[in-house]
Image (tube, rainbow, N blue to C red):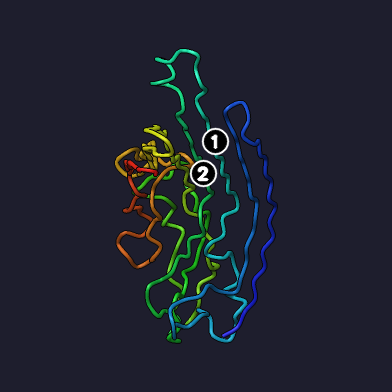
Amino acid sequence: MNGSASYDGLLLAVQKRLSSNYSLTTNYTLSKCINDGDPQQFLDPLYSHPGDPKADRGPCAGDRRHVLNTTVVVNTPTFASRRMNMFAGGWQVSGLFQALSGSPLNVTIGRDQALTGAQNQRPNINGDWKVANPTNDMYFNTAVFSLPAPGTYGNLGRNALRGPGTWRVDSALSRKFSISGSRQFELRVEAFNLFNRVGPGVTQQINGFGGVGLPNTTFTNTLFGKITTAADPRIMQFALKYLF
């Protein structure tokens, strides 16, 4: 199997080095990736349309048009008051904010409708798949899809739909406590997905960004168009390190 791919991207970055007790780094990527097919398991057919590789040309599976990352690190200052410095001085707080636009969704039939033995055949699409208020029960308009006639291929392109965008915040709080000489204790608390954006069970309506999983994209599946998975919930971890 062979094929081609292209990638175009714009990367913008802003950085403020550590001064005045804080640093800030932000980068934004606007990109577009297109290929003839994504790598699959060994011996699986790469193309769903034998004899016409370009019929599968579309967005790469990992294509994310918009990616934004922002990292902030803040150090608490040294206070004149010994008591104040004991409790509030020497702490470091860091946070990471990440937002990504939705990944491509490849709608497949789930059976050999074209009677060729090729996998990942796609249905016909007869209208706009987007809905005004996507929910976990209906992320896209399933009524616009239909089976092609036996022995034929559908007109839907590969990876033609887009999943929900996501955003999350990770944070950390740490401080070193001197004992004597070079010996220190370091206390660290970390929280991943700080705001617990898990999607289902939080809100039934998906407003642009959330923590939901991807909808089912198999046309013949009873869960077609539904989101039944979620991102990882909030995870916290504590660490105590002895330095000598």
Tell me the amino acid under the disc marked 2.
Answer: Gln
Query: Residue at horizontal 53%, vertical 48%?
Result: 100
Q: Is 163 left or right of 238, judged from the image as shown?
A: right
Query: 132 or 77: which is nearer to us?
Result: 77
Residue 73: give x, y in percent of width and height: 53, 35
Q: Can I make out residue 167 in this image? A: yes
Query: Residue at horizontal 30%, vertical 62%?
Result: 222
Q: Which of marks 1 and 2 is nearer the N terminus?
A: 1
Query: Residue at horizontal 46%, vertical 76%?
Result: 40
Tell me the amino acid under the disc marked 1.
Answer: Val
The N terminus is located in which quarter? Answer: bottom right
Residue 206: give x, y in percent of width and height: 42, 42
Q: Is 9 left or right of 185, judged from the image as shown?
A: right
Tell me the quarter of the picture where residue 243 sits: top left
Kind of element beneath mark 2 = strand
Question: Residue 169's mark?
Answer: none
Residue beneath disc 1: 72
Tell me the quarter of the picture where residue 52 sits: bottom right
For disc 1, the neighbor class at 10 Å (few under 14, some 14 to 19, many from 20) is: some
Residue 54: give x, y in percent of width and height: 62, 77
The CA distance from mark 1 to mark 2 is: 12 Å
Residue beneath disc 2: 98
Query: 238 or 158: which is nearer to us?
Result: 238
Q: Which residue lies furthest to the top in this view?
A: 81
For disc 2, the neighbor class at 10 Å (few under 14, some 14 to 19, many from 20) is: some
User: In this picture, is 92 found above or below 219?
Assistant: above
Query: Residue at horizontal 45%, vertical 29%?
Result: 91
The C terminus is located in which quarter? Answer: top left
Residue 84: give x, y in percent of width and height: 42, 15
Q: Residue furthest front?
A: 181
